[in-house]
Image: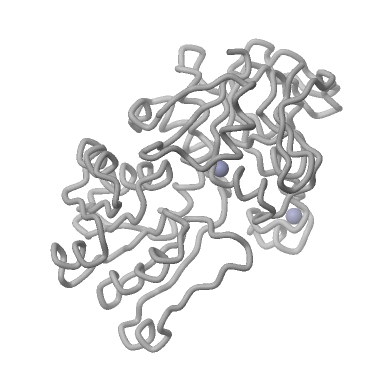
Amino acid sequence: MKATRLLDIGNVRTAEVPVPVPAPGEVLIRVEACGICGTDRHLLHGEFPSRPPLTLGHEFAGIVVGCGEGVSLAEGARVTCDPNTWCGHCENCLRGRVNLCVNNVATGLGRDGGFAEFCAFPAHKAHLLPADLDPLHGAFCEPLACTIHGIDIGAPKAGERVMILGGGVIGMLALQLCVLAGAEVMLVTRSASKQALGQRLGAADVAATEEAARAIWPKGADLVVECAGVVDTVEAAPRLARSGGRVVILGVLPAGQTVRVEPFDLLFREVQFLSSFINPFTQERAAAMISAGRIKLDPLISRTLPLDEAAAAIANPARPGEIRAIVLPRG
Ligand SMILES: [Zn+2]
Ligand SMILES: [Zn+2]
């Protein structure tokens, strides 16, 4: 079968590899759709920890086509794959902080992932999806699960003002979750097309810059959710929070990247500066929301592409205005 593999830092290519055999406790999944994430680009450039050589792809859904020993998942079932597999016995797992597991071997980062025709996957991390779900929608469960965790941390309340910084897939999902929570939402992005989409998805206001956002909401936002993963917006986020407000960093900056914030301002205005990492216990909630059609996903799909084009798509930056590109391993 074909698989798009990170052979080493800086070297991604699609190659022929054997179809994996599911080990005890695993299922074999025929991948239907796998989203290209900013993290895949970070992995290629060595900006996020990984263990090459391996097949990339951690945002995928597919059909169970085989079971390893001890697994009883029905063949033919559609599942979303939670790539993060905690160990259950390290000190962080034992405190219930499973997303901080020191032994997490994430599929698509630490073991072969979903940019392939087939993937062997831990059965207990496969969550059932409806048989009639659009397969493309299944690929959004993982990013939505990560976004749900970030919004749990930010905890928007009905009637609060929330600023979303960044109009990528995480920003568009966070926007929708905050609107569903009853918040008044502003999307801050320089992209005019993303501003227009944000309004269609329920944003009350849009702005292109920090200054423009402040002009619309002079007191700032109760909650600022940084979803862009760039230095400028991380630095702007606390400045855009109102006194007593919260900031949640959901965007991923390269490891080692630093930013400038003013601790006195955080202290004097008691702004909480929080961060959110992956998807502890939220994949099932994401699957439920997507299965019920509560999140608008079609407008977030910028393009689909075959496996042969995946390596080039990962090696290049996202196209202007692109929100999510999704690989269809079987064309
Ligand atoms: Zn991702
Ligand atoms: Zn652990």
In the image, residue 240 above or below residue 106: below
Depicted 60 relative to depicted 104: above or below? above
Q: Position of residue 318 (x, y in %)?
A: 48, 40
Q: Is residue 24 left or right of residue 64?
A: right
Q: Count the numbered circles shown.
A: 0
Q: How is the image coloured?
A: one colour
Q: Quadrant of residue 111?
A: top right
- The correct choice, above or below, for 220 with respect to 134 in the image is below
The N terminus - image quarter: top right
- Quarter of the figure with the C terminus: top right
Could you say which is closer to the camera, residue 225 or residue 165?
Answer: 165
Q: Position of residue 80 (x, y in %)?
A: 58, 28
The residue shown at (38%, 82%) is: 266
Q: Nearer the viewer, residue 182 or 5?
A: 5
The percent coordinates of residue 182 (x first, y second) are 23, 49
What percent of the width, then of the height, locates residue 222? Answer: 27, 66
Q: Quadrant of ligand 1?
A: top right
Q: Is residue 294 left or right of residue 158?
A: right
Indicate left or right for 155 with 143 as reference: left
Residue beneath the point at 54% across and 38% down: 142
Left or right of 91: which side holds 32? left
